Amino acid sequence: MSEKVNVLCAKWGVKYGAEYVNRLYAGVARHLDRPFRFVCATNEPEGIRPEVECAPLDADPHVKDRHWPNIHAKLTLFRRGFAGLEGPTMFLDVDVLLTGPLDKFFDYHPGDFCIIHNWVERRKAIFRRPPIGNSSCFRFDAGSDAAHGVYESFLRDKDDPSLDRFFRKGSQKFQTRAMFERGNVRWWPEEWVCSFKRQCIPVWPLNRFIVPRPPKTASVIAFHGNPDIPEAIDGFYWHKGRKIPPHLTCLPTPWVKERWENP
């Protein structure tokens, strides 16, 4: 039997309810064959199914101009001892859609950091794609010196004005930098993890007539930015009174609804 592994997510604020955690757990249980421990880092455990272990988020580390908790909470999950986690640990955002087998994510380059190579607009990758990860799906060895080193780098650098550029928009730019400092970093194979808005929505103007389709090889579909999962289900035309960029418009997407409601 394969060793027991960890699956970790985080929930704070009002945007994502307990149903996101519950559906993510159901998707993992369906697509991961080996035994696993599922932990949700949250201060709001109400409504989360009993199979999920809820662990409180760390105390406020006081990132400048940021209310706590926020996206930087992901960096505190690398702390040695968090929730008693040890060994191979895959983090998943609660708003990813699971569509295929997950065991390969634990077999891929064991012991290294693994993360999505962040998707960027084509015009920003003319010469090369920036070496920045997308933290919707990443893996680390909880309890290891390398993982704890990411947390230590966060505490050391969060108040350094010269490093503001790494924290300004979020945590994943800094997270990738700290990973590269502390160990080997591997990008997930492109065919395993896809972006809904970059790889499922047809190019403009075809997106006005063709329903988004997932790559057949994808196991994880990330909904970063807009459209989010409810917007993809309903169709994404107009949002809070502002016009949607034509290339992000999408028709109602039944397969997202089916996977979301029956993970």
Image (cartoon, rainbow, N blue to C red):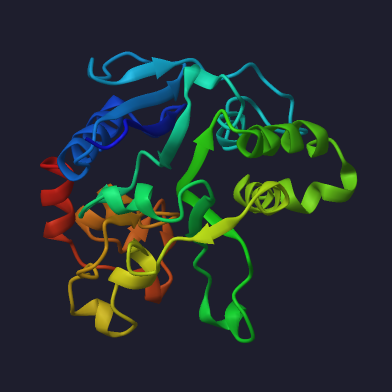
Question: At 54% from the left edge and 21% from the top edge, which residue is drawn?
Answer: 82
Where, by quadrant of the figure, is residue 75 drawn? top right
210 sits left or right of 46 in the view: left
Question: At 34% from the left edge and 83% from the top edge, which residue is drawn?
Answer: 204
213 sits left or right of 236 in the view: left
Question: At 24% from the left edge and 39% from the top edge, which residue is drawn?
Answer: 28
Instruction: Indicate the position of residue 44 as horizontal and vertical percent values.
Output: 41, 16
Instruction: Indicate the position of residue 227 as horizontal and vertical percent values.
Output: 35, 57
Instruction: Indicate the position of residue 57 as horizontal and vertical percent values.
Output: 53, 19
Of residues 42 and 144, the one nearer the viewer is: 144
Instruction: Locate the N terminus by quadrant.
Output: top left
Of residues 225 and 91, the one nearer the viewer is: 91
Of residues 261 and 86, the one nearer the viewer is: 86
**In the displayed structure, would residue 32 be above or below residue 63?**
below
58 sits left or right of 246 in the view: right
Of residues 70 and 52, the one nearer the viewer is: 52
Instruction: Indicate the position of residue 6 as horizontal and vertical percent values.
Output: 37, 32
